[in-house]
Amino acid sequence: MKRAGNELLQFLAGLAMLTAGLFIFSQKVMVSSRFFGHGLRLGGMYMSNGLIMVPFIIGVVWMFATEGSAASKLFTAASILIVILAVILTTDIRLTQVTLYEWVLILVLIFGGAGLVARILFASRRTNLPEGRREDKRIEETDKKVREIEEELERIKRER
């Protein structure tokens, strides 16, 4: 027997669990960057921090000099992508030391909350009907099956 209020409470409880789990997880993660003083290794090529900006500068100058040609825009976009990639690849994300209890608590809160939220958001429309309408639907389906069986019985009687 599901009611709309019960589903709202489940959704809010799931959202609270998910938020709490992500908050605790964010408190246990250390993020640092080694961008300064290091470079970026792409394939076999090593680019220092200053060299990463050179393609971007060339792309911007080229774009203004040629009044925004398609090739200059593409080159500038590619250089921006390289800069973003360099920042992402030089970021270290580490989980601090946590107890097993804390780790299980974090996982249960995050994935249990996500499960509750997903169950409410992706519930089938038929279960979202009020109880009375679901009963009406079942009664209609049962009546239809009864009529089909009666028609089949009548057909069998006529054939004898």
Image: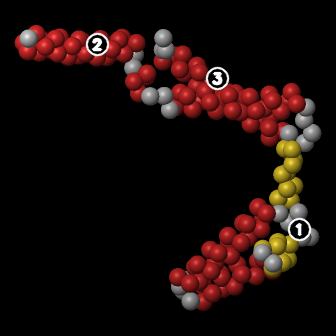
Identify whether 111 is placed above or below 59. above
Residue 153 placement (x, y as % from top left): 16, 11
**Do the numbered discs 3 and 1 sit on residues whose CB atoms are within 8 Å?**
no
In the displayed structure, would residue 29 be above or below residue 99?
below
The residue beneath circle 1 is: 36
Say what secondary structure mark 2 lies in: helix
Badge 2 crowding class, 10 Å Cα cut-off, few under 14, some 14 to 19, many 20 or more, is few
Label 1 crowd (10 A; few <14 / some 14-19 / many >=20): few
Say which amino acid is labelled 2: Thr
Residue extending farthest to the bottom is 65
Above or below — where is 66 with respect to 49?
below
Badge 3 marks a residue whose secondary structure is helix
Q: Amino acid at mark 1?
A: Phe
Mark 3 Cα-neighbour bin, 10 Å: few <14, some 14–19, many ≥20: some
Give the spatial CA distance, label 3 vs label 2: 37 Å
Q: Residue at x 57, y 32 (%)?
A: 118
Residue 111 at x, y percent in the picture: 69, 32
* Circle count: 3
35 or 156: nearer the viewer = 156
The label on residue 65 is: none
Question: How was the colour assigned to the protein in this rendering?
Answer: secondary structure
Q: Are marks 2 and 1 in contact (CB under 8 Å)?
A: no
* Sequence-first tag of 2 and 1: 1
Residue 125 sits in which quadrant?
A: top left
Residue 142: which disc? 2
Residue 13's label in the rendered image is 3
